[in-house]
Amino acid sequence: MKKIAILFMTALFCVGLFSQTKSLTGAGASFPYPIYGKWAYEYQKLTGLKMNYQSIGSGGGIQQISNKTVDFGASDAPLKAEELDTKGLIQFPMIIGGVVPTFNLAEIQNLEINLDGETLALIFLGEIKKWNDPKLAKLNPNIKLPAKDITVVHRADGSGTTFLFTHYLSQANPKWKNLVGFGTAVEWPAGVGGKGNEGVASYVKQTDGAIGYVEYAYALQNKLKAAKIKNRDGNFVVPSSESFQAAALNAKWEKADHFYLILTDQPGKDSWPITGASFILIHKNQQNFEKAKTMLQFFDWCFREGSKFALELDYIPIPENVYNMIEKAWSEKIVSGGKKVWSN
């Protein structure tokens, strides 16, 4: 009876919070948008809390949380300690997924193509212009590639997906590193731009001969072909939740300052080379205690109960030991009116 009473009181406490905080707002990365949308839908069914998340790109998410126009921001490009401290923010990884090169080539609709990082960089540099280029033919000896122009499609907005993709290209090709580098936005040497993962996927789908890069869920949703990539161990790997998981296993979060960690080009025979985490950004000093508590309760539910939905969409949930580190950071760093918002 005592246990039932405690559960009842806990339920009343949560209902009290949700009756006062009926909605939350977030903005940022399109990389995690499919899973954030799913979590928001399922959580609203349970609690009535409405989540309004705008998929505007990581750059926009960082700007909006910095300006305090949303409750939380989301970015696939982690911020370094100095910038977090300057802005008064805390960041933590929310989900792990993969960026994939996706293509539309009518002549090989039912076949997979192989790519490596060096060649992929040359395509996006605009130096490889035809699908039957000798470098591509060498990687695909059993496929007759057409003499068709390659249309490069990249992001037009500030993007964490771009951060992960260009970070990988910088590791794979010194020429790319020197000429373009990496970041949420870069000076693209070639191609056309699409807004968001949605825009890139749509452009590739509509354009025969196109190649772009998107978060894996967008390739699946749009029924786009994703290329295999030669990983650090020399194996051509298919993008999948298993290959993202293989890359994530190498993550050393306990050594990461402010959870700053990039997972591209991880070792392992099965590792997908363009794997990355997507991060949540919130202010350390929260103006509204109840809203802050409700927000962390939502994230807590996502970590503890949302894993099955993440796996259904081919994302990788944050490991429990990492979540315990995140919860500890919440309890130590997030306050409102001088009070700790979270206790673990």
Image (spheres, rainbow, N blue to C red):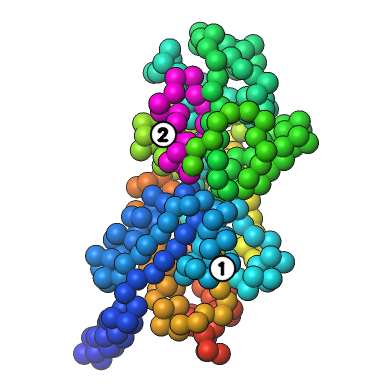
User: Which numbered marker is on residue 202?
Assistant: 2
Which comes before the other along the chain, label 2 or label 1? 1
Given the image, on which type of amino acid does mark 2 rest? Ser
Q: Position of residue 145 (x, y in %)?
A: 52, 11
Instruction: Judge from the rendering whether residue 327 lies leftward or rightward of residue 53; answer left or right.
Output: right
Q: Which residue position is annotated with label 1?
A: 67
* Mark toward the viewer: 2 or 1: 1
Residue at point 37%, 34% (across, down): 222
Q: Is residue 56 left or right of residue 223?
A: right
What's the magenta region?
Answer: 196-215
Residue occupying the point 31% across, 67% down: 50
Q: Is residue 45 magenta?
A: no
Residue at image point 48% right, 63% down: 320
Q: Is residue 25 above or below residue 308?
A: below
Q: Quadrant of the N terminus?
A: bottom left
Q: Position of residue 189 (x, y in %)?
A: 67, 30
Q: Are marks 2 and 1 in contact (CB under 8 Å)?
A: no
